[in-house]
Amino acid sequence: MASVEECRAALAKLVAQFDEIDEEDRAKHVVERTVSARVSDLDVIFYGRLHHGGLEPFTEEPPPDGKSADVKLTIASDDLVALVDGELDLARALLGGRVKIDASFGDLLRLRRLI
């Protein structure tokens, strides 16, 4: 099981990976959304925001407006680290039940193009 600190590092790496996406691709596929990543085996939730400029750093502080995230990811700590490191394929993880994403169908399609 990965630690909370390792999960924070993985999410920071994910933010950096989003920064590398071509601005034109982001403009085509990114719609502003709030994102939560629930790490099931550590009972911790990280919150972030996706927008045309990229992905903001994740924090453990819920959004001040108290609203639920638009895109909710549930994943085990080891799978989060493996996914960000490219060792776990998102589609296979979804089909195998290792990752759960609660989002609109449109959001899923847009995110799939970016990952």
Image (tube, rainbow, N blue to C red):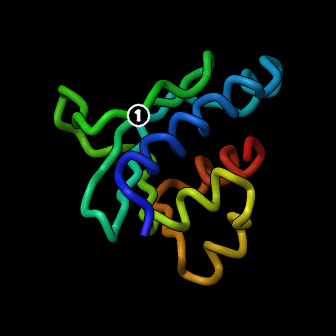
Residue 111 left/right relative to 98: right
Q: Residue at x 52, y 54 (%)?
A: 104
Q: Residue at x 63, y 61 (%)?
A: 82
Q: Amino acid at mark 1?
A: Phe
Residue 1 picture location, percent across and down = 42, 70
Residue 79 vertical position relative to residue 95 in the rendered view, above or below: above
Hey, which residue is sitting farthest bottom in the picture? Answer: 96
The answer to which quarter of the image holds residue 18 is top right
| Residue shown at the point (41%, 54%) measured from the top left | 72
Label 1, residues with CA under 10 Å away: few <14, some 14-19, many ≥20: many
Task: Please state which of residues 99 and 5 is positioned toward the viewer in this rendering.
Answer: 5
| Left/right of residue 21 with respect to residue 84 in the rendered view | right
Q: Is residue 13 left or right of residue 19?
A: left
Residue 27 position by quadrant: top right
Element type where label 1 sits in the image:
loop
Give the vertical position of 39 relative to 13 (above or below): below
How far from the left and from the top, in percent, is residue 59? 33, 33
**Residue annotated with mark 1:** 58
* Image height of 47 relative to 54, above or below: below
- Residue drawn at x 55%, y 28% as measured from the top left: 55
Question: With respect to residue 114, does 21 lie above or below?
Answer: above
Residue 101 rendering spot, x and y as whole percentages: 50, 62
Q: Is residue 6 left or right of residue 20?
A: left
